[in-house]
Image (cartoon, rainbow, N blue to C red):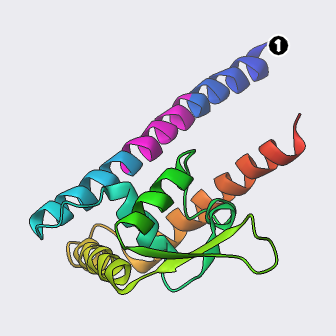
Amino acid sequence: MNIPSAVTATKETAFMGSYLDALAMVERLHRLLLDVIKDEFERVGSLEINAVQALLLFNVGENELTAGELKTRGYYQGSNVSYNLKKLVDMGYMHHQRCQLDRRSVRVKLTPKGRAVREVVARLFARHAEGLITQDILDAGSIKDISSTLKQVERYWTDQIRYIY
């Protein structure tokens, strides 16, 4: 009577294959997103910042944050956040100021130059959203399902980091 265990093993193997495919797709999509942003900045003739920095500016938006808050809010994933923030401040895309309460901490916000970059990215994303709808690639329900599923995976992974030693 090994049939149930054989069926379970087959399902687990199939799930594992699909899971690994999904992980590879997430990684490819992130790299592709950065390429799309880079191409947009090349198209508009703005080559001073890279795609990671442009996406960082987009995600900061009108907020005033510390580098730590950028990471905890999920706006920036990377070990070189301080490097990119320093570069963006030096190039005039962000303003920085020491926190009054904790002098070790620096708060950043966009300058008008940074808001202009954010607007380029916002227009790009708006064009993409419109194209996905008009070309019947995604509808409101589909994108909601994708987002919901990705949030569930994010919560699971976060729990793994926080609660599994």
Label 1, residues with CA under 10 Å away: few <14, some 14-19, many ≥20: few
**Quadrant assignment for the N terminus:** top right
- In depth, the one of 160 and 22 nearer the eye is 160
Residue 127 among magenta residues: no
Which residue lies at the image location 45% right of the left edge and 74% below the top edge? 94
- Which quadrant does the C terminus fall into? top right
Q: Main secondary structure of the magenta part?
A: helix
From this view, report whether residue 47 is shown above or below residue 134: above
Number of dots carrying numbers: 1
110 and 30: which one is in front?
110
Q: Does residue 12 lie above or below 160 as drawn?
A: above
Q: Give the x, y percent position of residue 49.
A: 29, 60
As helix, strand or loop, the secondary structure at mark 1 comes to loop
Residue labelled with disc 1: 1
Residue 4 falls left or right of residue 165: left
Q: Residue shown at 60%/66% (left/top)?
A: 148
Q: Quadrant of residue 116?
A: bottom left
Part of the protein shown in magenta: 17-29
Q: Amino acid at mark 1?
A: Met
Q: Report the residue at 17% width, 66% height from top.
A: 46
Image quarter of residue 44: bottom left
Looking at the image, residue 133 sits to the left or right of residue 26; the answer is: left
